[in-house]
Image: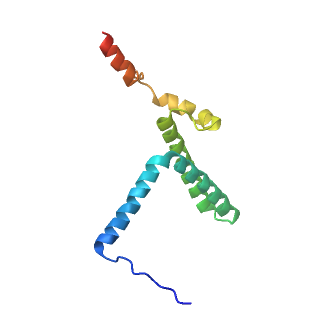
Amino acid sequence: MAVHRGTGHTGLLASIVAISGLICLLVWGAWRFGPTITRYCGMASWWAAWACGSQGGYGYMVLLLVLGTGSWACGTVWYVKRRGHWPSPLSQRVFTRMHVRQRTKPSTPPRTARRWRRWTH
């Protein structure tokens, strides 16, 4: 059975278009799904840490636990800042104290409220 191998474009311009397309796709994916992907990467790191620890790789286990916890925490805080609500009750319970401490200055009213006040006075 003969298989026809098609000729692809091998020029410099084709390589630039392919690489820039891949970069655009990755940037869009990070922008669109960033908080969720970051949280799931943290949970995947915990799973990999458990696998390393069960095989005796305790150094890797500690490294992956720290990496996973940091990734999950960053993704959770990013999720709250983007969506305005906590992704789960557990996240709310863990991060509420830390999130409240960061907001020491009074919050500004929404743009629509400021705009309305400007036109009414």
Q: Residue furthest top?
A: 121
Q: Is residue 97 above or below residue 76?
A: above
Q: Is residue 39 left or right of residue 54?
A: left
Q: Residue at x 33, y 71 (%)?
A: 14
Q: Residue at x 68, y 65 (%)?
A: 56
Q: Residue at x 54, y 33 (%)?
A: 85
Q: Position of residue 71 (x, y in %)?
A: 53, 49
User: For the C terminus, which image quadrant?
Assistant: top left
Q: Is residue 109 left or right of residue 51?
A: left
Q: Is residue 81 above or below residue 11?
A: above
Q: Position of residue 54 (x, y in %)?
A: 70, 62
Q: Position of residue 37 (x, y in %)?
A: 53, 50
Q: Position of residue 73 (x, y in %)?
A: 54, 44
Q: Residue at x 59, y 56 (%)?
A: 45
Closest to the observer, 111 or 10:
10
Q: Is residue 113 above or below residue 97?
A: above
